[in-house]
Image (tube, grey):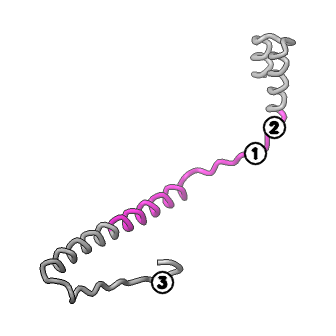
């Protein structure tokens, strides 16, 4: 089912033994019903996911601010030993 076209398959079982044909037809029918059920379930899940995503709040991500650069520099100073952990935390929170 690509591009809006639908495919239909016919199985000609007229040449089979009646008992074998009946069993085969039942098996094929059960498999087709199962596949059809999977397809319906996948479509429902897709619809539910689309609905949930359309209601989800949008999160905007901005470019790193100057604050991030400042914290990075403070971290480097702390790692280098130029400031203590306490000084780092104080400066980071201000």
- The answer to whether 35 is drawn above or below residue 77 in the figure is below
Q: What is the magenta range? A: 37-66
Q: Whole-percent x and y of residue 71?
A: 80, 26
Q: Secondary structure at mark 3?
A: loop
In the rendered image, which residue does mark 1 sit on? 62
| Residue at image location 25% in from the left, 74% down from the top | 29
Q: In the drawing, what numbered circle is on residue 85?
A: none
* Residue under the image location 46 percent in, 63 percent down: 47
Q: How far is disc 3 from disc 1 in space, using C-alphas? A: 43 Å
Please tell me in which quadrant of the rendered image residue 88 appears.
top right
The CA distance from mark 3 to mark 2 is 51 Å
Check disc 3 and report the residue beneath it: 5
* Along the line of sight, the residue nearer the viewer: 44 or 91: 44
Q: Say which mark, if any, is on residue 65.
A: 2
Q: Is residue 20 left or right of residue 57?
A: left
**C-alpha distance separating marks 1 and 2:** 8 Å
């Amino acid at each position: 089912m690509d591009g809006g076209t639908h495919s239909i398959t016919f199985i000609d079982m007229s040449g089979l033994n009646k008992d074998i044909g009946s069993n085969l037809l039942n098996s094929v029918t059960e498999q087709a019903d199962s596949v059809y059920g999977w397809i319906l379930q996948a479509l429902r899940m897709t619809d539910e996911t689309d609905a949930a995503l359309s209601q989800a709040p949008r999160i905007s991500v901005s470019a790193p601010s100057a604050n991030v650069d400042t914290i990075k520099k403070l971290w480097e100073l702390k790692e280098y030993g130029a400031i203590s952990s306490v000084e780092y935390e104080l400066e980071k929170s201000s």
